[in-house]
Image (cartoon, rainbow, N blue to C red):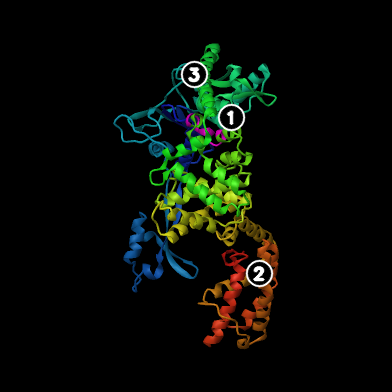
Amino acid sequence: MHELLLEIGLEEMPARFVLQSEAQLKDRVENYLNDARITFENVETFSTPRRLAVLVNGMSERQSDLEETLKGPAKKIAVDAEGNWTKAAEGFARGKGLTADDLFFAEEKGVEYVYATRKEEGKETASLLGGLKQVVEGMTFPKNMRWSTGALRYMRPIRWLIALLDDQVIPFSVAGVETGRTTRGHRFLGQEITILRPNAYAEALAGEHVIASYSERRELIERQIGELAEKEGFTVPIDAELLEEVTNLVEYPTALFGGFDPAYLELPEEVLITTMKEHQRYFPVKKDGKLLQYFVTVRNGNADHLDNVARGNEKVIRARLADAQFFYEEDKKADIDAQAKRLDKIVFHEKLGTTGEKVRRVRKMALSLSDRFGADQSKVDRAGAIYKFDLVSQMVYEFTELQGLMGERYAMMKQEDPEVAAAIREHYMPRFAGDESPRTATGTLLAVLDKLDSVAGFFGVGMVPSGSADPYALRRQAQGIVQILSERNVAMTLDELIRFVVETQLEEGLYSADAETLIDSLREFFGTRLKFRLSEAGHRHDIVEAALSTNLPVGAVEDRASMLEESAKESTFKTTVEQLSRVLNISKKADKVEAIDASLFENEAERSLHSEIERAIPLVEAAIEKADYRAAMAALEATVPHITAYFDGTMVMAEDEEIRSNRLSEMKRFADAIQQVARFNALTLV
């Protein structure tokens, strides 16, 4: 059995891209080996800021032999009237590297086809691994660069390559770098080392102060921080994202702690934590839930001269906190209304005007919809005027992560209403997947309209997300709107909101676009976000399609999906769906709905279904009014025997035009009621 080591040595990579690149390299190597029919036991992965590597264990000596049966054209095409092979058959054989002598016939579903069996003896594994060059060159990254005179675009310049099969180098080059068996240890504590065999890789690097395993480095950092906390008598809340980032910034971690002047504890806690975590990658320190004047950081090196390292970090944080204190004191002197006026000098986007214009537009819309959201109009008026004022504060200019948070704090200092202050922070919510929705009515209203104004505005000027490109995070904002509408049980529908915002933007001349085309595009965009939410809740695909509607409150759509999930467990569900779907499908042939003429009924089944429809429609409408989809479903279920009898004894598409029109009107009228409950013909029955 063989062992394979592939290592890509790079200049320091951005920490946030390391793990995804490690996973991508593993996938690419596995796919390459599988495509080459090379079997293996497992693949281990390694990554540090300067390297990505895979170790493949238990590789086969040879690729598997290939034997496959190939299907060609039908016999009637493959042979002519005299029984000779046609050009189609000969071309099929030639294209597969075979001859006509290799062809034979076999029957499939009552039809004879030409077949051929192709066999290929497996080659030695060593002869197939030169293709790893394409694996390395094919790596993709969120951001790329070129270096030197090469054409290859890569996350960072490649500095060395290892490609070893057992003790032999697999020769190829990428961007002018030849493969070998030499890797590099820690930039300052280690040196170049020769890897004799793949399974010696991790141990050899450890001897040169490089812990190649991400999980080992992370566990070591957590253990070291825990030991420091226990020794010093404090606690260190471990932020998972910060821990991942720090782990991917170091090759040989050593945790240490330092401190700062306790006078800085008078700053808002969020300022201190942001300064430490976001700007310095420090872990804040607490005791009994209160922030202390200490921090824990992780050095990329050993424990030598830790005191000097701690002093250096203390000097940096001291300067940062001094700046923060200055910004904070200056901001406290500022007038909120004066700051809000300065938003006219901030360009939101060159095609969509200034932030000040956006704020005034959102405020106008919010005042119009305050009753629909159950919000106090006076609070909406004030919050709408100032909800982005902190963007011009010195603190937020320096620490953009604090937008909204500082606005709320400054507003409370200036004696603003607590709900108004909260709305300044809440209008950004949810900031990310899994984040909370706003809690106040004012914050909910501003959060929805601020996001929808952005989404509709960018769509209006033709800046629509495509593929993975979404520079203005429109998908995230749209997903946030759907989440808020659901979790805060907002009665307005997505259709209503979209139309209201688009028409407001067009009235103000924000852009020039066909209103209905734009609304349709936004409806489809938000429909996709709503689908995603329903799928994330565990609903199966066809139930999502049956329940989906942007012309209902989001909560009602979710209720429809839940009702369908529950109903699907019942033994009668299949029959119910089949019969309701028959009504929905035939109703599509109705051009218009006219008053039903009972004198045109020709049989008892027709009269019976009419009576049942007359009974069911008011029940369905009353249940929908109360958002009781289970009761609406029960009303429809009661009509199923009558639908079955109707279709068994009645031809809807009768030759008599008057009778046909009467029956189609009946079906269309009933179908409209059914579709208020769900689009049953979108369900997949098994």
Q: Residue furthest left?
A: 149
- Give the x, y percent position of residue 156: 40, 31
Q: Nearer the viewer, mark 3 or mark 1?
A: 1
- The amino acid marked with disc number 3 is Glu
Q: Nearer the viewer, mark 3 or mark 2?
A: 2
Instruction: Based on the picture, tell me whether residue 498 belongs to the magenta stretch.
Output: no
Q: Residues within 10 Å of mark 1 (few under 14, many from 20)?
A: few
Please give the range of residues in magenta.
397-406
Residue highlighted by disc 3:
208
Residue highlighted by disc 1:
270
Residue 55 visible, this angle: no
The quadrant holding residue 678 is bottom right
Residue highlighted by disc 2:
576
Q: Nearer the N terminus, badge 3 or badge 1?
A: 3
Gap in Å between the C-alphas at discs 1 and 2?
56 Å
SS of the residue under disc 2? helix
Gap in Å between the C-alphas at discs 3 and 1?
39 Å
- Give the x, y percent position of residue 507: 44, 55
Look at 55% across and 83% down and name the residue there: 660
SS of the residue under disc 3? loop
- Give the x, y percent position of residue 168: 42, 28
Do the residues bearing badges 3 and 2 touch, measured as CB atoms within 8 Å?
A: no
